[in-house]
Image (cartoon, rainbow, N blue to C red):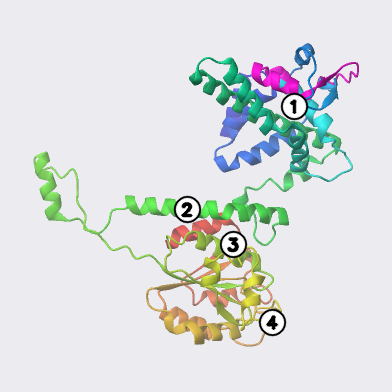
């Protein structure tokens, strides 16, 4: 509500006919996190696809002097005028407008470029990136930038002023490209008659709040791109927290010595250094078909934080168990866990978990390496496919007794635990903690708690 009120009050101070002013105002009052900016951009372009800046005088777009042959010749259909009485060299006019910093002409040229070179067809299902690539290929902004730089340097007597002009030119070109993107989105929304709710559904949730098990292929792609940056930011946060944390008990002798400079007042207490013990992590991930994607993201996230968990060892299981620490370090399986299963000699590819068999094999092969300093993290939905065995409870009890801590991360909603073939409530008895981890946000919260 506070942001909504701020936005409403701020909009009273700007010209509501100016798209750029409305967009900047809403962005500055509603967007609170930098990684939410792309979501705001997408929402704005779809909701306000018909909002355009007031038309500027059209006679400013005509080419100056005789025509050249450096670019494609197009008809004068800018500003929606649809006049075919005059044609002009588009690249030459664009170059002149960039050098003159003619904002009105650049706005019109962006619309003309989309109309003339985009060829947006309402029957096609191409994306904005497809049309943008097609238009950029025609415009060749790299060559255009070279020509503009040469002209600026030849017309300027001062090298410093020339560099300033070139920097300003680069900003105008970047803004011109952004205008083309906005115009493409506007045309797509208009020509395809989008259902606004459907168009926004795929982008509504921030990437860190997308459900692992319900994510679409496009959302999975966005999540893969976000995993490593999120992990690096979290690692930096943990390192900063450790630096600021007071370590150990107060050192009376050093505190008294420091207080002598302040007349005996202990303004600056000294603390005894305390040895930091970073977790010795064992990640044991269920990679059966139902939770394979969740395992990929968990392994990717913790591997990206290797500096915070230097003793991280990774294991996978379905109906057998295998260590994949070396493969994960080399990046194998982080995008498709099937590559890890294919390399294993002890795991079949039937896709159905057998906890009893897998846990027995894990204990026999790796149980002796677990010590009182080890933290074991199991991931999976804890569904045993209606098998009649003990589902590995005996082994889980041994791991609990031998290790420092045992955690279980489940990507299913907490309300589904214990339903049908879910053994989560039985596993919970031998875990230090069980966590619902359905998205990247909850995964970050868990890592913060154990680090």
Which numbered disc, 2 or 4, marks the residue that appears first in the sequence? 2
The residue wearing badge 2 is 234
Which numbered disc, 4 or 3, marks the residue that appears first in the sequence? 3
Which numbered disc, 1 or 4, marks the residue that appears first in the sequence? 1
Which numbered disc, 3 or 1, marks the residue that appears first in the sequence? 1
Q: Which mark is residue 110?
A: 1
Which numbered disc, 2 or 3, marks the residue that appears first in the sequence? 2
- Check disc 3 and report its element: helix, strand or loop: helix
Viewport quadrant of the C terminus: bottom left
- Check disc 2 and report its element: helix, strand or loop: helix
Magenta highlight range: 79-105
C-alpha separation, residue under disc 1 versus residue under disc 4: 61 Å
Residue 167: percent from left, percent from top:
56, 26
Contact flag, marks 3 and 1 (Cβ < 8 Å): no
- Tell whether 184 sits left or right of 151: right
222 or 442: nearer the viewer:
222
C-alpha separation, residue under disc 2 versus residue under disc 3: 15 Å
Q: Nearer the viewer, mark 2 or mark 1?
A: 1
The residue wearing badge 4 is 386
Contact flag, marks 4 and 3 (Cβ < 8 Å): no
C-alpha separation, residue under disc 3 versus residue under disc 1: 40 Å
């Amino acid at each position: 509500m506070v942001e909504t009120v701020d936005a409403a009050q701020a909009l009273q101070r700007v010209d509501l006919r100016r798209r750029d002013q409305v967009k900047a105002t809403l962005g500055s009052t509603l967007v609170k996190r930098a990684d939410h900016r792309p979501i705001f951009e997408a929402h704005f372009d779809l909701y306000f696809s018909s909002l355009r800046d007031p038309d500027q005088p059209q006679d400013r777009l005509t080419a100056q002097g005789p025509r050249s042959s450096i670019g494609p010749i197009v008809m004068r259909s800018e500003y929606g005028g649809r006049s075919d009485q005059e044609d002009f060299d588009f690249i030459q006019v664009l170059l002149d407008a960039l050098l003159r910093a003619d904002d009105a002409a650049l706005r019109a040229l962006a619309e003309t470029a989309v109309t003339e070179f985009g060829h947006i067809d309402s029957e096609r299902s191409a994306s904005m990136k497809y049309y943008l690539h097609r238009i950029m290929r025609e415009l060749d902004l790299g060559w255009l930038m070279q020509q503009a730089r040469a002209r600026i340097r030849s017309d300027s007597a001062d090298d410093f002023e020339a560099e300033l002009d070139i920097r300003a030119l680069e900003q105008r070109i970047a803004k011109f490209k952004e205008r083309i993107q906005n115009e493409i989105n506007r045309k797509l929304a208009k020509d395809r008659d989008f259902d606004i709710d459907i168009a926004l559904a795929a982008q509504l949730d921030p990437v860190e709040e997308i459900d692992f098990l319900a994510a679409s292929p496009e959302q999975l792609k966005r999540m893969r791109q976000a995993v490593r940056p999120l992990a690096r930011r979290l690692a930096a946060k943990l390192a900063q927290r450790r630096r600021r944390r007071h370590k150990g008990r107060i050192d009376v002798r050093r505190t008294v010595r420091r207080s002598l400079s302040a007349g005996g007042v202990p303004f600056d207490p000294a603390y005894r250094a305390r040895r930091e013990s970073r977790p010795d992590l064992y990640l044991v991930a269920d990679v059966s078909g139902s939770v394979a994607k969740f395992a990929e993201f968990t392994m990717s996230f913790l591997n990206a934080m290797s500096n915070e968990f230097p003793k991280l060892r990774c294991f996978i299981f379905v109906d057998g168990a295998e260590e994949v620490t070396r493969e994960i370090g080399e990046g194998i399986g982080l995008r498709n866990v099937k590559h890890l299963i294919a390399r294993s000699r002890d795991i079949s590819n039937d896709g159905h978990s057998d906890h009893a068999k897998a846990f027995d094999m894990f204990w026999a092969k790796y149980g002796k390496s677990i010590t009182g300093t080890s933290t074991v993290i199991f991931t999976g939905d804890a569904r045993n496919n209606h098998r009649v065995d003990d589902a590995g409870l005996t082994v889980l009890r041994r791991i609990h007794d031998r290790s420092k801590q045992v955690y279980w991360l489940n990507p299913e909603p907490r309300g589904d635990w214990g339903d049908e073939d879910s053994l989560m409530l039985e596993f919970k008895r031998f875990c230090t903690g069980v966590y619902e981890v359905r998205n990247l946000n909850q995964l970050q919260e868990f890592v913060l708690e154990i680090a």
